[in-house]
Amino acid sequence: MDNSFDVIIIGAGVIGCAVARELSRYDCSCLVLEKDEDVCCGTSKANSGIVHAGYDAKPGTLKAKMNIRGNEMMTSLCEELDIPFKRIGSLVVCTDEANRDGIDDLYARGITNEVPDMKILSADEVREIEPNISDDVVCALYAPTAGVICPFRLNIALAECAEQNGVEFKFDSAVADIRRSGGKWIVVTAEDTYECSAVINAAGCHSDELHNLVSDRKLHITARRGDYMLLDRSLDGFVNHIIFPQPTAMGKGILVTPTVHGNTIVGPTAIDTGNKDEAPVTAEGLAKVSEGATRNVKGLPLKQVITGFSGLRAHEDGGEFILNEADGCDGFFDCVGIESPGLTACPAIGEYMANMVSGKLGLKLKETWNGICKDVVKPFELSAEERAELIKEQPEYGRIICRCETITEGEIIDSIRRPLGARSLDGVKRRTRVGMGRCQGGFCSPRVMDILSRELGVPLDSITKNGGDSKILIGRTKDEG
């Protein structure tokens, strides 16, 4: 790899990959550096999967502008990138008459932000569309443009599209230093040293640290942990919309929502932590999730939980998205403090930053650019005739590996062989949903490991859960032979 680039993006989460895809429209050399073993390993892998309507953000802020623009872009983006997305609408539920004014305030804020088609529903109107809503419901703000999306597929598809248009990716490449030299930026990792004309800092919870290496105007990120519960798909239809409580200073509160794949998700908490790399699931956090969820939804069958998980979001002290060229740092661009609604805003942030950087460097659009990217082939989404023909040509699509999610060997092979393919159990899981069902990989993981070992040409005991030292096998129980 030539170590000189026009642009280096630090971070392969949904923001870094959205920027990379937009920059791939231009005639420039671009490298994405990621400290982990794959795309979608940080904040982007553990969130609510919500596309927000845009009524919550303070009018005039970048949060508000990027939310509204990102929501507008999402339908066409998901069609281009073959991403599951459903506009199911959201409800912000008021359960105390004394707080009704808060719903009116949110509605007014949404109108200022130009959120379309909102309504304030009466208690009876809410019960009509959500029979399992709390008996205490007073009213609710309804926003039909909100939706649910697959956050893994969004992140991965953005990266794959960027890669097919010439962007290079380097994994396991944590940035150790950044400095200015001879009119260029020098970016140092443990393995290599790179130079570029522009740096885009999209490092999530670590973005303040990178910014503070080069700028006298210091920033501070607090890692805010969010705990979730995921319920079995047998509860599909228990709720039909994204159900929020009224928001607080710490966030949008404990939501209950269907996922795009038919599960029900509950969460998140908002617990500030000093650890920017680990988000352990705790009994305390799950208790808060349970308590918060049952305030707005009655009879929620929490015994149907199939897993708990948690993630971190990057809260900047000012509570605003920072999307600019850092003061006094020519060619160093920040994407800092990207918390909710960051997933919704990512295509707009990509567009915004690519325009800023291309203008700075005088980049020209390519004559040809391919914005279409197809997902892993899913045989059980085909007609019976199409599936039979596929299996005839490629028998591995007839061998089911994950029974809970009905995932075939062919899909797993595709996820490994495709551009920026999976290299770990979690990498396969995020691309195919293998191991995401009721048994949580209890039966299929050994078979997935065998396929990874075979396809990558590496020993079985080198296969990891998510890169690094996360090996599954640590030795043999007896000698061979």
Image: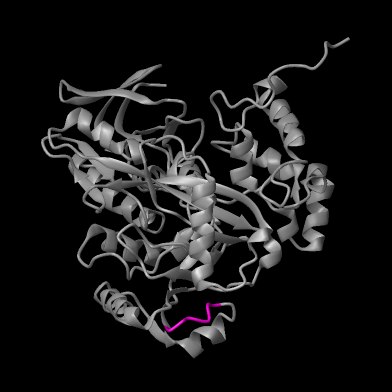
Tell me the chief SS of the magenta region. Answer: loop
- Residue 28, placed above or below residue 58: above
Rendered-image quadrant of the C terminus? top right
Rendered-image quadrant of the N terminus? top left
Choose between 459 and 387: the one closer to the eye: 459
Choose between 335 and 222: the one closer to the eye: 222
Q: Is residue 81 magenta?
A: no
Choose between 253 and 241: the one closer to the eye: 253
* Residues drawn in magenta: 133-138
Residue at figure coordinates x 15%, y 34% from the top left: 329
Left or right of residue 83: residue 177: left
Q: How is the image coloured?
A: one colour
Which percent across, then down, holds residue 412? 69, 41
Q: Is residue 88 visible?
A: no
**Rendered image quadrant of residue 61:** bottom left
Q: Count how many numbered circles sit on residues in the image.
A: 0
Which percent across, then down, holds residue 51? 44, 63
Q: Is residue 263 visible?
A: yes
Choose between 463 and 243: the one closer to the eye: 243
**Rendered image quadrant of residue 214:** top left
Residue at figure coordinates x 26%, y 37% from the top left: 208
Residue at figure coordinates x 20%, y 46% from the top left: 324
- Residue 127, placed above or below residue 160: below
